[in-house]
Image: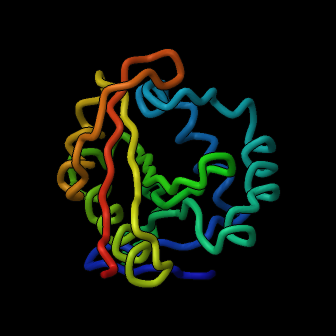
Amino acid sequence: MKIILETERLYLREFEISDAINLYHLNSDFDVIKYTGNKPFQSVNEAENFIKLYTDYKKNGFGRWAVCLKGTHEFLGWCGLKKDTDSKEVDLGFRFFKKHWGKGYATESGLACINLGFSTLNLTKIIGRAYIENKSSIRVLKKCKFKAVKNFTYDNQPAVLFEINYDRS
């Protein structure tokens, strides 16, 4: 198990093949993926293949990470940074099982990822995107100190672009 970050209640680690069942169930919940533009995995095997083919850790040195509860090691969801191959922008993303919504896990893990991005990865800007209808994700981004930059269309939906900057001067 490769732990990347720890917070007061959580640890974030690289995905493992054993996470396939959790990712399958996470992406099978319509409420969880409602604002993501993603389709559910068709099988646990498809989720397993996603993990096997996930190259962000090697390619960029970071990616989306499994978020687990300290003490019980329960898989809560995922959070992390992702680099867009075309724009080179790095975004913060998160997704949690519904039973864990409203407990501050997205904010806690998001802040830890932002800190890692600025302090260790030497990033100067991280973005976040949310559909305008996705009030919960917008609240998390604001709690993570992101500022709304503009409204735009993302995956044919009205959305808000957020960013947080780190001045290295």
Image location (x, y in percent) of residue 18: 69, 62
Image location (x, y in percent) of residue 36: 49, 31
Going by the image, does 39 lie left or right of 128?
Answer: right
Residue 50 versus residue 158 in the image, above or below: below
Q: Quadrant where the C terminus lies?
A: bottom left
Nearer to me, 124 or 158? 124
Residue at (69%, 34%) from the top-left corner?
Answer: 41
Splitting the image into 4 quarters, where does residue 28 fall? top right
Image location (x, y in percent) of residue 87: 60, 47
Nearer to me, 140 or 166? 166
Going by the image, does 97 lie left or right of 111?
Answer: right
How many dots with numbers?
Answer: 0
Image location (x, y in percent) of residue 135: 23, 31
Residue at the front extreme of this rendering? 169
Q: Is residue 116 visible?
A: yes
Residue 63 versus residue 42 in the image, above or below: below
Residue 132 versus residue 121 in the image, above or below: above
Splitting the image into 4 quarters, where does residue 64 fall? bottom right
Residue at (20%, 42%) from the top-left corner?
Answer: 139
Nearer to me, 21 or 109? 109
